[in-house]
Image (spheres, grey):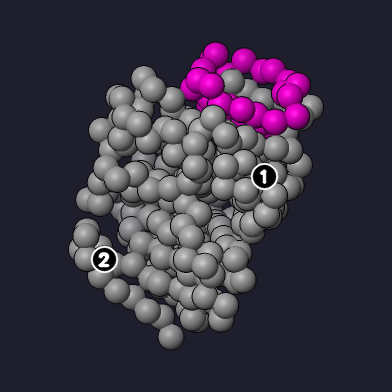
Amino acid sequence: MVNITTDEFSGLKKVQLQSAEGTSAEIFLHGAHVTSWKTSKGEEVLFVSKQAIYKPPKAIRGGIPVCFPQFGGFGPLSQHGFARNSEFTVSASAADSVTLSFTPREEQLNLFSHPFELTVQVRVGSDTLEQTLTATNTGSEPFELTAALHTYFRISSIDKARVDGLQGVDYLDSLQEKERFTENGASVHFSGEVDRIYLATPGRLEVVDEAKGRAVVIEKEGFPDAVVWNPWIEKAAGMGDFGDEEYKEMVCLEPAVAGSGPVTLQPGASWSAKQMLSLRQL
Ligand SMILES: O=P(O)(O)OC[C@H]1O[C@@H](O)[C@H](O)[C@@H](O)[C@@H]1O
């Protein structure tokens, strides 16, 4: 049975999930946007800005925005596509999982003339969260898509956090006109703005939080790339829905179809990709 409630703060509809062991998540119908994933001990793993604006069509700052049918500026649409700005409906549910679906409205089809259905399935397990995107081309012509699960992880302090698993991987540096570099370090550390698209990465990456004594393990399928982002001081100050100091509390690690090239979806065909999040104590 689906548990749809009205969020007290924003007045928006959201779905709450709980696993048998007590892991929980909440997902707003606006954007199929996961805004909370709590361990069975009640500890929040995701970051949401205290200044997030809960006014559709604005996307919520934090949690896991769904970037579709475009990631970033890889296409003609505005940044990250329009799924994160759109209302979804519940198409299936259980206590520990929900499937939300979305088809573009007429004005969106004027911008992106390819009808599709997008579903986002979210499932919680014992200290895990699994999220699957599935897109079906319901039109009569092939189209190209890029996408990401733009996951904001809460960390205790940016100087004690790192991303592991990217050594030897090439990346496009979005701060240097997408120039291509190779990651030499065993870990990505943060001491300034970082905005990189790592290409064809391993399927398992980690956001390690030394101060918390834990790592979030990100396993991904169908998303070749991974974006690492922290806005740092200046960009944080320029964002109206993000606190000036909040860059210290978050790291984005985003499984993506981006720099490795778009996926082409033939008429009637479906594309699916997912991330599985779990925890590892250090
Ligand atoms: O402000 P937005 O549209 O949510 O985007 C946030 C960031 O998202 C990241 O994925 C991009 O790589 C950054 O360049 C961008 O600044």
Q: Residue 57 carries which label?
A: none
Which residue position is annotated with label 2? Answer: 7
Give, as a three-letter code, the residue at label 1.
Answer: Glu
In this picture, which residue range is highlighted in magenta? Answer: 174-199
For residue 150, side relative to residue 276 (left or right):
left
Secondary structure at badge 1 equals strand
Which residue position is annotated with label 1? Answer: 206
Taking the magenta stretch, the answer to whether it contains residue 262 is: no
Q: Position of residue 266 (x, y in %)?
A: 62, 52
Which residue is more in the foreground, 75 or 282? Answer: 282
Kindly check if marks 2 and 1 are in contact, taking CB atoms under 8 A apart as contact: no
Which residue is more in the foreground, 279 or 167? Answer: 279
Secondary structure at badge 2 equals loop
Q: In which quarter of the image is residue 102?
A: bottom left
Which residue is more in the foreground, 151 or 132? Answer: 151
Q: Specify whether tag 2 is near ligand 1 (CB below 8 Å).
A: no
Q: Nearer the viewer, mark 2 or mark 1?
A: 1
Give, as a three-letter code, the residue at label 2.
Answer: Asp
